[in-house]
Every structure is written in structure tokens, then in C-alpha cells.
Image (cartoon, coloured by chain):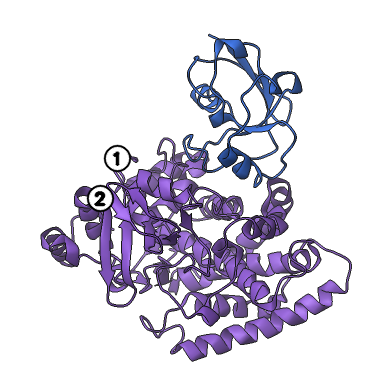
Chain colours: A purple, B blue
Amino acid sequence: MTTATEPMSPVQAAARERAFSLPLQQIDPSEPGLFADDTVGHYFERLRRDAPVHRSHSPMFGDYWSVTRYQDIVSVDTNHAVYSSDWSRGGIVISDRPMNERLQMFIAMDPPKHDVQRLAVSPIVAPANLAHMEGLIRERTRRVLDGLPRGETFDWVESVSIELTTLMLATLFDFPLEDRRLLTFWSDCATANPDVDQTRVSSWEERTAALGEMFAYFTRLWNERVNAPPRTDLVSMLAHGPATRTMTPLEYMGNLVLLIVGGNDTTRNSMTGGLLALSRHPQEWAKLRANPALVDSLVPEIIRWQTPLAHMRRTATRDTELGGQMIREGEKVVMWYLSGNRDERAIAEPERFIVDRPRARQHLSFGFGIHRCVGNRLAELQLKILWQEILARFPVIEVVGEPARLKSSFVRGYTHLPVRIPG
Amino acid sequence: MPKVTFIAHDGRRFDVQATAGDSLMRAAVDHDVPGIDADCGGVCGCATCHVFVDPAWAGRLAAPSAQEDEMLNFTAERREHSRLACQIPVTEALDGLSVTMPEGQH
């Protein structure tokens, strides 16, 4: 994404020229390459201006509606009766998988089943429980930061973002700490699309096999915990909860994937994206150093700026009208949160990263309506502690090379960010 | 201008001169009352302006819509008189209204 404060690179300038000269019907913002080189923002800007509810076509994902303005996205997100998330209709991501590969998780269900399954796990991330977790998160964050190398280049993604989010997940599941990188691996497999990018898994078969190993591992944990008194980890909560203890194996698997991906990829990429944003806006970093209390608005601004999930998909349950367009029952509707979070109609100077942005919490990254991110407060707490502890330690962290970005139109993130801490 | 009172989880009281026609959420946000986050800006989309209405006042408010009821279901501690402040229009008749805030908005 370009910003007002940096000159546009040749790659960005060429993308902008193309985005504003292509015939509208040829614009396909779901093309994963546009996310790998971070040029998709120009296409979104064109669509917001010229075709805010746009009939898009992808050679890979078929026909879909692109919704790119903030207010239209809110309208879709808060109307689950017309815009269904249910896996049986297509679910929540742009790609349509065969029925037997679709994940039966509560984010991909409509009421009433969605409601009871979500309520079974939401207490673990409620305010009272977060207060209990804060000390542990801070202690681990300190340990990870204190162990970072000085005066040499290392990968922030690997050493900080993955390590911290994986430790958190292992705690939430009471998962054996020594095996915790399996959680990262499974999460990456779950969101991988081998038709687009083979770096995570090379084929759908390999993905299915990895998720099968995950299921076997978690079935073992379920069996241990269902026979023990209820505890406060997620597996025990699912195994004992009245609404979840009778889940089918497919639903157990689906909800595990949801909780692992939800707690992993998203926060991980915000941890990386925040550092990248501040390094590209040195005057904002200076503001933050001068007033560390700004962490409170820094955190939502990072989450807006990064938008770690670029979209959520819905399927129309009936013919409906949106932004002057007629959407037919069964058609796929993609809410581009990344675009809504750059919509100048809703957010002032949206391309700028501003650590003391007024009303910074008003962004789309968590979604709105009944599917709003259940772990949002935990994510914010993790980011807040990370930045408090960074500010207390490191006057500067240098980003010494370009980030490597994921080739995905769903998870907007990084595989690598080379950094150096002087000293 | 009707006076409304917000009572924080720790017992602190915030008396606000609200503007009739605004929502109760807007009255809190415009007067910097802590504990009302209002992440969605007032479209009944996030449930981060959750309040417990004083039982003496609860009956004088219009019943919550189906959408508000649904969003309240996902708050951390829904009670009998739970409401979303963005869905309560302030009127002169609400002069003296008092609401309490939960431990945190979620």
C-alpha cells in the first residue's frame, strides 16, 4: 500500500496506471499476485470511485460481487439474514471448495447453530479472563524480546510474530508447549490454497493429510479432557460445553481450525505489519516514543492499517439490492475489508498511518454483526503489551530489507521481514 | 438538556448533560465517558456500548430491536436490563436516567 509520505515505486506507479485504465469489467481484485506485490490498493481505489458494488470475475474463483466502500460493507456484515455465512452455501472465503472439504466452524454457520457454538468458547476471551492472562503474556513477551540478537539481521516474523502468537495459542488450548510449532504449521495449512501458492503445502491432498494429523492430535486431547473435570482451556470447554460436547467430528475439526487460524495468522501479521508501518512513518514512531500512552490508539491503527484478513465472503439468500446493483440469490458477495479501511468517505486520510488517529477504533478489520471477531480484545491486548515492552527496551528497530508478502487474497500477511536491533 | 448518569464498573459516576435527539452512546462519547467504546460508530454492529439500565428506568425505554437483542447475546455478561447505548435515543423524558457499565466491552 502506498502512503502519502513516500514516493511511489515503479511497480506501484505501473499498477496504478493499469488500475485506472483497465475497463471496469476486467478488474479482478481477488488476483493473489496483487497481494503478493501489494498493488491491490490501486484497484480498490478505482472500484470505490467508479463501481463500489462491482460484478467481478476471477479465472480461479468464478463470478463474485466486490463490495469496496466502508458503509456498504457494514450493511452486508450486519445483515446475516440476507447475506449468509453458512458453509453449505459457500462459507466465508472467496474460494468454493467441494462439500467434503468445507470446514464446519461457527464462523461459517448462520443462527441458531452459530450462536450456541460461539457462546461455548467466547468466555475464554471475555474481559474478566483477559485480566488473568495479562501477566503471563507480558512475562513471555519480555522473555522473547530480551532474547533477540543485537547488531545482526534476523527475521521478525519468525523470531517475534510467530513465536508470540504460537505461545499464546498453546496456552489457550493447554497444548503441549514443546509441540507448539505444529499449531503454526496446521494454521498455515488450513489457510493455504495450493492452486495459488505451493510454499505452504504443495497440493490439496497434502493439506488434507496435514489437517488429518491435526485432527488425530486434538482427538487425543479431547479424549483426555472429556474424562477429566472441566477446565478453562478451549479443548476442555468444547468437550464439556452443553452446546459443543455433541458436535460431530467435522464440527470439532472446523472449530479447532477457526480458533487456531483466528488466533494465529491475524495477530501474527499485525505484529509484523505494525513494525513495518512505524518504520515507514518515522515521525509517527517519534511521536509514540515521546508519548508511550499513545499505544492505546496505536493498536487499533495497526489493525486497520494491516487489515490481516483482506476479505470475508457471504452468499445471498434471496434477490436483493445493494448500491444500485441487483444481487441474485446464491451469488457470492465479497466484502473487501482492506478496501473499506482505506475508504476516504469513512476514514480521514486513510492512506496515512497515524498513531494518534481520532476514533481509531472505528475500522472494519474485526467485522461487524454477529460474526465480529470473538478474540478481538485478546489480539489488542497482545499487541498493546508487545509495543509497551518494545518501547521500554529498544529506541530503534531497523527494517533492513523489503518484506516478503503472502500470495493470498484472504490472509494479508508476511512470510519474512528482515530487521536489525543496533547494539 | 436531560441529565444522564453513567456509572463505571469501579463505581465512578459521570453526570452528562445530553442533547435530546442524540443517542445515549453519543452522549457518553462526546463527553469522554470512559468504558463506552462504540467501535461501530452507532449502527448496532459491535456491542461495545453495552450498559445496564437502572431497573427503575428500564420500563420507560422502547424494547430492543431483534438486531440489538442478537448483538446483546454476544456480550460477556448480559443481564435483564442490558442495552446497547447506541440504540437508546435521548429525550427530555429521560432526564435523570442512570446506567451502569460492565467490566469491559467485548
The quarter holding residue A355 reads top left
Determine whether the residue tagged by mark 2 lies in a helix, strand or loop: helix
User: Can you give x and y, in whole percent of width and height, for residue B23 in the image?
Assistant: 52, 24
- Image location of residue A299, percent across then percent down: 49, 48
First in sequence: mark 2 or mark 1?
2
- The residue lying toward the viewer, choosing from B50 and B103, is B50
Disc 1: which residue: A345
Q: Quadrant of the N terminus of chain A?
A: bottom left
> What SS does tag 1 mark?
loop
How many labels, in total? 2
Where does residue A75 sit, x and y in percent of width and height?
A: 41, 45
Residue A328 vs residue B86, the one in the foreground: A328
Q: Residue at x 42, y 50 (%)?
A: A76
Q: Residue at x 47, y 59 (%)?
A: A270
Any mark on residue A216, and which?
none
- Image position of A46 with respect to B61: above or below: below
Give the Cα separation between the discs numbered 2 and 1.
Answer: 10 Å
- Horizontal placement of A416 versus A349: left or right? right
Q: Mark 2 highlights which residue? A: A48
Disc 1 marks which amino acid?
Arg
Q: Do labels 2 and 1 share a chain?
A: yes
Q: Which chain carries label 1?
A: A
**Residue A96, quarter of picture:** bottom left
Work out whether A187 lies above or below A382.
Answer: below
Q: Is residue A326 visible?
A: yes
Q: Position of A284 compared to A10: left or right?
A: right
Q: Are marks 2 and 1 in contact (CB under 8 Å)?
A: yes
- In the image: residue A335, left or right of residue A220: left
Locate residue B92: give its quadrant.
Answer: top right
Q: Is residue A12 something one can see in this rendering?
A: no
The correct choice, above or below, for A294 with respect to A302 in the image is: above
